[in-house]
Each structure stands twice: as structure tokens, then as C-alpha cells.
Amino acid sequence: MNVVNESPRRKELTRLAAQLFVQEGFDRTTVRMLAQEMGIKSGSLFHHFRDKQEILAAVIEEGTQNALTLARHALEQCGDSAEERLHAMARAHLQTLLTDRNAHVVALYEWRRLDSQARAHLSHLRDAYEALWEAVIDEALDGGLIHGDRFLVSRFVMGALNWTVRWYDPEGPRKPEDLAHELIAMIAPSTQSAQVGSTKV
Amino acid sequence: MNVVNESPRRKELTRLAAQLFVQEGFDRTTVRMLAQEMGIKSGSLFHHFRDKQEILAAVIEEGTQNALTLARHALEQCGDSAEERLHAMARAHLQTLLTDRNAHVVALYEWRRLDSQARAHLSHLRDAYEALWEAVIDEALDGGLIHGDRFLVSRFVMGALNWTVRWYDPEGPRKPEDLAHELIAMIAPSTQSAQVGSTKV
DNA sequence: AGATCAACCAAGCAAGCGCTAGTGTAAACC
DNA sequence: GGTTTACACTAGCGCTTGCTTGGTTGATCT
């Protein structure tokens, strides 16, 4: 039994599991369904994962890790202004949602099915991500870009962004870039940002 | 077997079920757990509900119906200005969340566990509620209170509001009134609204 | 007094669940 | 050339699940 093994095979299986968890929900997804989707028998599954819980944890860890990496990268690449940084975060968030959609839906909806041990471990990752957001929102507040209660504003923004998994259609006309732009226009309407529309993917 | 019976007993059982569904999730809540919480045996449960699915549907219907009634009432009571109506909707939404919290959490997180039949029925209720929101947001857009894409703005607002179930603490210092006020200040900062702070519950 | 009825119980069935034990096999390594 | 390792298989154990069945109770109505 491989324990915390990070083989490419395991990554592929995790991706497939994420898809099934979104379709059926964690509890309704049986190990037999998972195995069939992976092209193996149910017993073989436990060669890659200690138990069913660990599959869920792997899915969520993968998604959150990617989001964190992407957000950090976006902040490094962009300018110093509060508006640019806010924009970069929103864009990164929505792009992650596009590419790792399944993992993020699972993270949002199946978080409570994690046992306390896995939850504690993954909380740190999630907190790190949310800390990035709060820092950027702090800068926007300090810079006078947006106004209001620090705690409430960051919750409202996170809510608006996370809710997008419910309705966003990647095939539709709106690009992540557009959503990020519109959101910031809504909460910081005084700014007439430079770039408009979706120039490129 | 009582079919679409609306006895007070059934309402009470529905309330208890909502609580358990929030604690454990729908799939992990067994009919035996439900029965024990209700002080009866698992077999007796099927005197009140056709099957487990119907309990879930009853919980969600109850919550959505209340939200709809409260929102309609709030719109009738308030003034005609776009700002007042927007404020009334936000306040009503958050108040419902306070009083019927369990039902709304279930509606948000367990919606996908409904079979297609129940989902079709409840979709109408939910759509009616969201239509109220979109109408009020339309008025706010027309009145120049807020700006942006009609579709996106209403999604962002709904997201910010629905996300509150994740973090809102009814025991904390912030009242629903305060949240509504802060949210509107965030998306329509030009307005200096008359009433400020939580004067009364 | 007899009938009706909602509400409940005891017992259990059939199916499905997560997971384990033991084995086979082909490639990789020393 | 023998050993190890990664990955898969078969078979099934022990338990829980949603739900059914047939029957009991106590209040209400005529």
C-alpha cells in the first residue's frame, strides 16, 4: 500500500475521482464506481489510497494547492497598485475555477465529509489562500479603492466569487477576465480601469 | 401512508430533519437517526413521509416558501425607491437565513440529492424567489443606483448573500440589518442611506 | 358500543457498502 | 538469475442501508 505516494498514476486517479464526486456527491460515489471509472477493480483502489476518505482529501488538496500557487504567481507578476493586485487575484481565482473546476466544487460542497484529521491539514492550505485575499482587500481599503468593514467586505467578495461555480459556463461568451473586471467595477466603481473586454485567453 | 399531508406533526418532524441534515449531510443521515431524533422508531417514519427523499424535499420546500413569503411581504411594506426596495430584499434574505437557517443550508448544499421530480417542483419556487431579486436589481440599475451587467450583478449579489451561511454568527455583534446595510454600501457607495446601525431587532 | 383512523412498534429482508486477505504477473533492480 | 516492487486481480466478510410487513394503541366520532 502506497501511503502518501505522489505517483502520476495517483494524480490521474484523483482527477477522475473529482469528476465523479461532482456528479454524484462523495457519499453516493462508491468505491466500485470509482474503480470502474478508473478501469480497475474495487480492491485495487486501495493500493493507491489508504481509504475512501484519503481520495477526497487528495482531490481537495490538489485543487487548493493549485489555486494557491496560481494566486501567488499572479501577485508576483502584476503591478504594485491596489487595483492591479485586486484584479490579479480575482482573475486568478476565476481561472482556477475554470481549469480545476471539479476539485473546487468538491472542496466547497464536500468539505464537511472530511474527517477531523484531514480537515485540520487542509485548513492550513485554505487559510493561506484566504489570507492572500484578505491582504489584497486590506490594500484596496487602505488605498481608498473600496470602502467598508474589512471583515464583511472580504466575506462578500469571497461569496460572490465562490458562487460562480454554480452558474458560470466556460463555454459561454464571458471569459474569467470579464467576470473579474465586472466584479471589481461593481465594488470599486470609481475606477476607470485601463484594460476592457476579453482580449485574449 | 400520508402522502402530501401537511399535519403539524409532519412540520415538526421536518424541522428536526433539517437540523440533522445540516449536522450530518443528507446521505449520512440514516432513517434510524432521524427516527431517534424524533422519538419514534424508524418504521414509523414512513407513515409521515413516502420515502427519505420526500423528507429532503419537505425541508427545502418549507425554507424556500418562507423566504418567498417574507420577501414579498418586505417588498409590500417598504417604500417605492430603488434603494429602499434593494435594502428591504437584502434584509429579508438575511432575516430568513437567521430564522430558517437549517432549511436554507440544506437547500444550498443538498439540492443535488433531490431526484429530478422533486427538483422540477422546487425549481419553480426557487425561480420565483430569484425573480424577485432580479426585478429589484433591475430597478436599482435603471435608477442608476448600481451599475454593470444585469446578469452578473445579480449573480454576484446572490453569491455574497448565500455565502453568509458559511460564516454568519447569529450570536455575534452584527445584526442582519447591519449586513444588509454594508452590502448595499459596497455595491452602491454613492448613496448615503438614512438609517444606520442596528436600532432594533 | 362499535367503527374509524392517525400514529406508532417489532422484526426483518434484500441489497449495497467499505474494506481485507491472499494471489498473480510483468517490469526493474542488484 | 534471483529478488523486489508496483499494480492488478478474485473472493468475500461483516455490517448498514432504506424500506416493508403485519399488527397494536388510544383518541375521536356516530
Image (spheres, coloured by chain):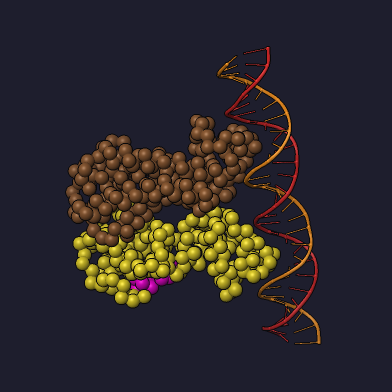
Chain colours: A yellow, B brown, C red, D orange
**Image coordinates for residue A164, horizontal then vertical, percent:** 39, 60
Q: Quadrant of the C terminus of chain B?
A: top left
Q: Quadrant of the N terminus of chain B?
A: top right
Q: Please tell me whether residue C9 is drawn above or below residue C16 in the rendered image.
A: above
Q: Residue at (42%, 58%) from the top-left corner?
A: A166
Regarding residue B118, the answer to whether it shows in the image is: yes
Q: Please tell me whether residue B103 is drawn above or below residue C18 in the rendered image.
A: above
Q: Residue at (32%, 63%) from the top-left corner?
A: A136
Q: Residue at (32%, 47%) from the top-left corner?
A: B132
Q: Residue at (32%, 49%) from the top-left corner?
A: B133
**Residue A68 highlighted magenta (yes or no):** yes
Q: How many marks overall? A: 0
Residue situated in front as seen by the camera: B128 or B83: B128
Q: Range of the magenta residues?
A: A67-76
Residue situated in front as seen by the camera: B165 or A72: B165
**Image coordinates for residue B26, horizontal then vertical, percent:** 54, 48
Image quadrant assignment for residue B84: top left
Image quadrant assignment for residue B100: top left
Magenta segment's dominant SS is helix
Is residue B50 rendered to the left or right of residue A172?
right
**Residue B92 highlighted magenta (yes or no):** no
**Image coordinates for residue A154, horizontal then vertical, percent:** 33, 56
Is residue A129 rendered to the left or right of residue B28?
left
Is residue B82 rendered to the left or right of residue B107?
left
**Image coordinates for residue B9, horizontal then vertical, percent:** 53, 31
Residue situated in front as seen by the camera: A142 or A66: A66
Regarding residue A47, the answer to whether it shows in the image is: no
